[in-house]
Amino acid sequence: MTDGPRTLFDKVWDAHVVAHEPGSPAVLYVDLHLVHEVTSAPAFATLNARGLVVRRPERTAATMDHITPTSPDSALDDVARDTLSTLEKNCAEHGVRLFAMGDARRGIVHVIGPELGLSQPGMTIVCGDSHTSTHGAVGALAFGIGTSEVGHVLATQCLLQRRPEPMEIRVDGQLPAGVTAKDIILRVVAELGIGGGTGAVFEYRGAAIEALDMEGRMTLCNMSIEAGARAGMVAPDETTFAWLRGRDFAPSGAAWDRAVARWRELRTDDGATFARRLVIDAATLEPMITWGTNPGMGIGITEAIPNPDDAPDASTRAALQKALDYMHLEAGAPLLGQPVDVVFVGSCTNSRLSDLRAAAAVLDGRQVAPAVRMLVVPGSERIKAAAEAEGLHHIIVAAGAEWHEPGCSLCIAMNGDTVAAGKVAVSTSNRNFEGRQGPGSRTFLASPATAAACAVTGRVTDPRTLSR
Amino acid sequence: MERYPVPLVSRALLLPHENVDTDQITPARFLRGTSQDGLADALFHDWRKDPGFVLNQPGAREAQVLVAGDNFGCGSSREHAPWALVAWGFRAIVSTSFADIFRNNSLKNGLLPVVVPPETHRALFARVGAAPETELTIDLDALTLSAPGVAPVGFSVDPFARHCLLEGVDELGYLVGFDARITAFEAAQARTHGESV
Ligand code: SF4
């Protein structure tokens, strides 16, 4: 327990420490445990082997997203079918709620958690998936865990954790037109580097963050892990409460009022200290895009690709050169105008309704360039239905893009959707590691608006230059 | 879990890249399926297509130590990354830093992340690069790393994780021991939230 003024992180952490023996990590209670098909099977197997049961099945929810098909030609193979049926069996045996194929609430785990109101302010939330940081957008402490830890949480609803340190990421001022939450986070990761947040939990603050809607905050928190942070958080406010109210699993009636009263306390106290700090002036932001092979290799879209010769040391020089070689790019050249083969709008970073609207707004009345394949993959069944209700799919299909079933799809390329070797994708997902979207694939990460702009021109394009 | 060897004495392989991410350690397409079989084949699968890659060197399978660049294991939470490294035969990774989740996952699987200062890291690369048969000695009990021609250095490991490794006990057993306190916590939380238990 921290004395004196506390940060948002401190408050949530302190409220969940079950025990803390000297010399040992804290036993931290988990309010919500989200499960998906890829990282859970060995954890259930451990439970079964030891004769343990799921301690709080009602605090556990499972979905299918990583390997699920998003079109008839990415159909299930035997391995995938076995993985999904294993999850079904495990959930049935242990009484865990599962949003299975065909369920109108199914979707990417980090999309449906907030969407269904499962993820709430002040909660501790874990999942065997690093982008669990997404749920921090509602003011929760949410982080990814490994499969052994999935077993720990299933059996005990607890985890052994060393306390991370809070770090302030402050974005002051107002975002310029055409700049989105995705651009903020790509800039944060570029400034910190992909290890710069190791050991930290980010709290995003400042006027530009307060002005973001919930979906933007999710995009922001989602990629905290890309700077190495365990989690990212935004203090819950009226925007949060208005967004959560009435969702399937949100409290209602008198319980809602009690919850909101509790949630209002979840703010960093004046005078609380952060271990570290990064301050960005929103006015200096422009649409961002990555050129290299990790998410920290991002630049403003009008900037030149970095030159390894300018790097401060030999190992950075070597890393930049290796990335340039893999990406077939030339140091010092502009990224604008680079040809593009595939455009992907989707993933737990950018597959929500506002993301699909942003992409559709660019596509409306335009055509995807003939050489480009564009896939739009909504994050959940609900989002797909909502997008169709407002006709976004018509705009997308009329422009020559593909409209898919919900899932992770090209973000991780393990469901049959892939980018071929040597091809270049502009992707709204969160990782551009070598081969992430298929062996030999090359990835530029960007916002939905930027991705859609690239699709219509067939080249890396600044979305602000497509006039209406 | 078996007890961690004290000391671990082994030759090492060098991976001179920074920010080696979990997509390189175990590409996602090898995460399909529900068992850990075959993960040694998945390890660095795409990089192994290069005949010059360090895992393709003669005798590479005998090395129990990998010396890699800064921020090793960044990226996803997939425990397949340490599983594959262990399946290959590695018991320790030496670097100047590790990504958080990877470090946690490794410690739970008998794979020791050893953080050394940059001078030691450079010295190890120079020594093992020049003499690949060089054996490193990593002592988890004394928390020291040494090798011929390299100044011995101490390292730190979370004391609890070290205890678990040395004794061969696992964290799940430890956590289950808190059952009564977890129940008490749940009751207290329900009261604060104004719920009936
Ligand atoms: S969309 Fe991508 S990052 Fe998100 S959960 Fe799926 S695979 Fe992971």
Image (spheres, coloured by chain):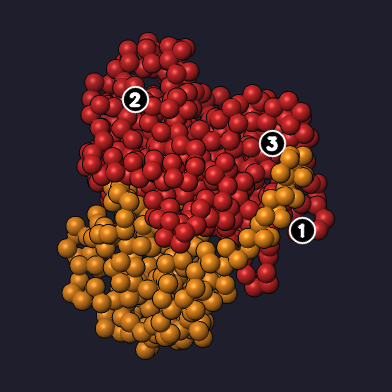
Chain colours: A red, B orange
Would residue A71 be found to the left or right of residue A249 on screen?
A: left
Seen as rendered, the residue at the extreme right is A4
Alpha carbon of mark 1 to alpha carbon of mark 3: how far? 21 Å
Q: Chain of mark 1?
A: A
Q: Secondary structure at mark 2?
A: loop
Q: Secondary structure at mark 1?
A: loop
Q: Are marks 1 and 3 in contact (CB under 8 Å)?
A: no
The tag on residue A236 is 3
Q: Residue at x 18, y 74 (%)?
A: B58
**Is A408 situated above or below A129?**
above
Q: Chain of mark 2?
A: A
Q: Residue at x 57, y 56 (%)?
A: A156
Kind of residue at badge 3: Pro
Point out residue A9 in the picture as x, y percentages from the top left corner.
Answer: 68, 50
Alpha carbon of mark 2 to alpha carbon of mark 1: how far? 48 Å
Tell which circle, 2 or 1, labels the residue nearer the N-terminal end: 1
